[in-house]
Amino acid sequence: MKDTPSTRPRIDKLGVKPNHDVLLLGIEGDEAFVAELKARGARVRTTGAGAADMIFATFRDRNDLRRLAALVPRLKSDGALWTLRPKGSRDLTEAEMMRAGQDAGLVDVKVVSFSALLTAEKFVIPVAKRAAHRPGTASPRTRGASSSRGRS
């Protein structure tokens, strides 16, 4: 069976819902994306300490990965961290991104073509660990968390 690209709108593939609190880090200059979020009814911000339903964070190279674990406490327990990285980059590979997410105690569950230049990978807190997750506090790391992602 041939793998055909999804025709669903990007905002639907990303799972953004009305009233979601969305934190943008490094992608806030994408006016089209910000307009999509606002049209969906999401509350968009670029700062603040409150836990977010979704975080969209840009990672340009492997040195940026050191920021990933610090984002986990900024997520609601049922929230999603969407990491955005350059497509086909040798400076940051899919395997490196997946390993960084797993090292931060997250599981990767989905990959989406965010734009012509960026790939988005969705990470979430494992269901078994959500009750213990305390936004705003350091999260214990879980090595070797499993992956159960789908592709869009």
Image (cartoon, grey):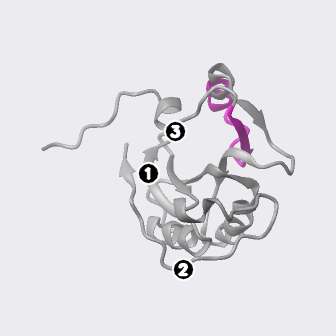
The residue located at (53%, 31%) in the rendering is: 11
Spatial CA span between label 2 and label 3: 26 Å
As drawn, 79 above or below 70? above
The residue located at (74%, 66%) in the rendering is: 70
Neighbourhood count class around disc 2 (C-alpha, 10 Å): few under 14, some 14–19, many 20 upward: some
Neighbourhood count class around disc 1 (C-alpha, 10 Å): few under 14, some 14–19, many 20 upward: some
Of the numbered discs 2 and 3, the one sitting upstream in the chain is 3
Give the residue number, with chain letter if any, for mark 3.
14
- Judge from the rendering whether residue 7 lies leftward or rightward of residue 142; answer left or right: left
Of the numbered discs 3 and 1, the one sitting upstream in the chain is 3
The residue located at (62%, 23%) in the rendering is: 40
Q: Is residue 52 visible?
A: yes
Which span of residues is magenta-colored? 20-36
Amino acid type shown at disc 2: Arg
Q: Is residue 91 visible?
A: no
As drawn, 121 above or below 46? below
